[in-house]
Image (cartoon, helix red, strand yellow):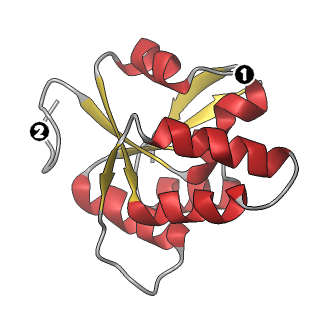
Amino acid sequence: MAPDRYGDSRCVTVLLDANALMMPAQFGVDIFAELAGLLGAIDPVTLGCVREELTGISRGRGRDAAAARVGLALADRCRTLDDGALGLPVDERIARFAEEQGMSVLTNDRRLRDRLVARGVPVIVMRKQKRLEILRG
């Protein structure tokens, strides 16, 4: 494992999007334990724009809002980084940052997943609503 710009060379840095941070509330999956079981030592990170997205969703009502509130609490277990790409959609910011930094991304968002795979970024997705799997680009 090569060290990335932000993390430790002994850890795999994984970028979590809003969808990933909402998975525990939606599916009852401990994403941090699952990531550690899949990859070993992990360095979970998220972007400031992902926190903003979760904040917006959390202000609503219903299951998604409740899941976003859980996601915000889980985001506290991640390092929050600034991608510096103002004005772009969140998914594009995630894709660019992960590609530039050599990070894997945990998401269940199909469009983001396809974009990342096309760019050669390793993507971790949930299968059968209970286990994580790596897709290689």
Q: Amino acid at mark 2?
A: Pro
Q: Secondary structure at mark 2?
A: loop
Q: Residue at x 60, y 36 (%)?
A: 125
Q: Amino acid at mark 1?
A: Gly
Q: Label for residue 82?
A: none
Quarter-of-image position of residue 108:
top right
42 lies above or below 88: above
**Callout 2 crowding tier (Cα within 10 Å): few <14, some 14–19, many ≥20:** some
| Viewer-nearest residue: 76 or 38 | 76
Q: Residue at x 58, y 20 (%)?
A: 30
The answer to whether residue 124 is seen in the rendering is: yes
Tell me: 63 left or right of 37.
right
Q: Label for residue 28?
A: 1
Tell me: 20 left or right of 41.
right
Q: Nearer the viewer, mark 1 or mark 2?
A: 1
For disc 2, the marked residue is 3
Tell me: 125 left or right of 5.
right
The answer to whether residue 129 is seen in the rendering is: no
> Earlier along the polypeptide chain: callout 1 or callout 2?
2
Quarter-of-image position of residue 128:
top right
* Residue 36, position as x, y percentages in the image: 40, 17
* Residue 115, position as x, y percentages in the image: 54, 62
* Residue 18, position as x, y percentages in the image: 58, 52
Q: Residue at x 66, y 61 (%)?
A: 111
Q: Secondary structure at mark 1?
A: loop
**Which residue appears farthest toward the right when viewing the image?**
62
How many dots with numbers?
2
Q: CA distance from mark 1 to mark 2?
A: 32 Å
